[in-house]
Amino acid sequence: MQSLTEDTQGYHFNVMRRALDVIDQAGPSVTLDELAAQMNMSPAHFQRVFSRWVGVSPKRYQQYLTLGHAKALLSERFTTLAAAHASGLSGSGRLHDLFIRWEAMSPGEFARKGDGLTIYWGWFDSPFGPALVMGTDKGLCGIGFASETGTANAWQDLVGRWPNAVYVEDADRLRPWVDSAFGAGEVSHETPLFMIGAPFQIKVWEALMQIPSGHVTTYSEIADYIGHPKAVRAVGTAVGRNPVSYLIPCHRALRKSGGLGGYHWGLPVKRSILAWESARVEA
């Protein structure tokens, strides 16, 4: 195994990704000593590294991962989208210390299913497992997580959305945007997004981007916000078809009951992202 120094960001990134996987699978029963042993670290060293990278202690993070956390978020941090937009809350959470700009593909371009479009792709480590990232010259157009679905399924899922595009592997081309998106190091690059979807889907994704980090809303609230109050089911479908996971925060949409609802890349990933955001906001 390659030896890496304590100050290497990639080392911390991989250690924390594995630790989050262990916490998600084992739940609150796993102890600090058990976590540290699985990471081949002393408990004191692991706690320092974890707290520095996630922003809270492992024990505190485990509390965020409990199933009751979604209900607590809905009662304490429910966001009315119109108010969030009017007050400029969108994007103000500490998770996103970056500037996101976006543009959408025209309906005609969308209908051609990527014909004439070159999409660059690469695999990256993320706080939530392996991430397949895709982008055009205009910005990121796809982020999929493979920890639950597997890499082959994640690839087929994203490629299947734009089957007529030309795909070119070029992780280096995407890396500055990806580093900014996932907060690696002290990166502060602008992160442009290129939304590829039908007009109704774009409206839903725009609404999702009004939800501040660490806050949540409901599917029915999104339907009201976009002017289609009876289209809750259609909104849920559009949320599930969001191609740019995490940056277009479909994970912040919950059921009125406080249930997590569905998540395209697996509910453990959704729960982990919500816990991660809560930790970063409160740190």
Image: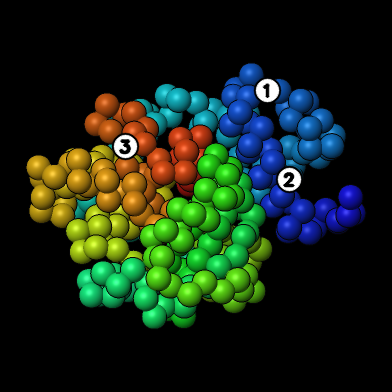
* Of residues 32 and 21, the one drawn nearer to the viewer in this rendering: 21
**Rendering quarter of residue 39:** top right
Q: Secondary structure at mark 1?
A: loop
- The disc at residue 15 is 2
Tag 3: residue type? Leu
Q: Secondary structure at mark 2?
A: helix
- The disc at residue 55 is none
Quadrant that contains the C terminus: top right
Label 2 CA crowd tier, 10 Å (few <14, some 14–19, many 20+): some
Count numbered badges in the picture: 3
- Residue 78: x, y in percent? 29, 39
Which residue in the structure is indicated by mark 1?
30
Whether 18 is drawn above or below 71: the answer is below
Which residue in the structure is indicated by mark 3?
254
Disc 3 and disc 2 in contact, CB within 8 angstroms = no
First-in-chain label (3 vs 1): 1
